[in-house]
Image (cartoon, rainbow, N blue to C red):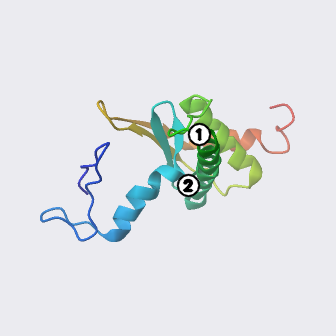
């Protein structure tokens, strides 16, 4: 997949460009992906898990927050969305804990977070939460430990 996106131009074409063919579904996914990411600082936080439902829950929560932020920005006449008041890692773990509390997760999923930006100095940071961390968070939110935690 060519990564030719610029700040002012969309370089992904539905019918493809000679040498750079792309499926329309891939283009749509790329264009909509920011809605399922959390805006933190100057970048976006995307979360993936080996538990598909967990990935969907992260995206749903981030989408709901983004829609609220869009409405607030439009009402205030702003062009940019505000970033999260939380730091990247705090937002990641807090959201994971909210999902754990809201639903009983099966097994101990792994979680990988991707923090990326574009512009003059594009970057990508990858954070991996292994089974031990998600297992610990699941354990402390069981009835035996929830109160003391």
The alpha-carbon separation of the residues under discs 2 and 1 comes to: 18 Å
* First in sequence: mark 2 vs mark 1: 2
Marker disc for residue 55: 2
The spot of residue 61 in percent (x, y) is: 64, 50
Give the secondary structure at mark 2.
Answer: helix
| Disc 2 and disc 1 in contact, CB within 8 angstroms | no
Q: Examine the image and state in which quarter residue 7 appears.
A: top left
Q: Is residue 84 left or right of residue 26?
A: right
Q: Mark 1 points at which residue?
A: 132
The spot of residue 15 in percent (x, y) is: 24, 71
| 1 vs 51, nearest the viewer | 1
16 shown above or below 127: below
Q: In this view, does 119 lie to the left or right of 36?
A: left
Q: Name the quarter where the N terminus is drawn.
A: bottom left
| 53 vs 29, nearest the viewer | 29
Q: Which residue is drawn at 47% across and 40% down?
A: 44
Camera sees residue 125: yes
């Amino acid at each position: 997949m060519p990564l030719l996106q610029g700040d002012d131009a969309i370089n992904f074409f539905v019918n493809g460009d000679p040498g750079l063919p792309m499926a329309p579904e891939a283009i749509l996914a790329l264009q909509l992906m920011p809605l399922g990411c959390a805006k933190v600082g100057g970048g976006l936080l995307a979360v993936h898990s080996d538990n598909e439902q967990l990935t969907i829950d992260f995206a749903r929560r981030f989408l709901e927050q983004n829609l609220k932020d869009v409405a607030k920005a439009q009402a205030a006449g702003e062009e940019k969305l505000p970033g999260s008041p939380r730091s990247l890692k705090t937002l990641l773990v807090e959201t994971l804990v909210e999902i754990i509390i809201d639903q009983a997760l099966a097994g101990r999923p792994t979680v990988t977070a991707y923090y990326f930006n574009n512009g003059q100095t594009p970057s990508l940071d990858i954070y991996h939460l292994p089974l031990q961390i998600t297992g610990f968070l699941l354990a402390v939110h069981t009835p035996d430990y929830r109160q003391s935690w």
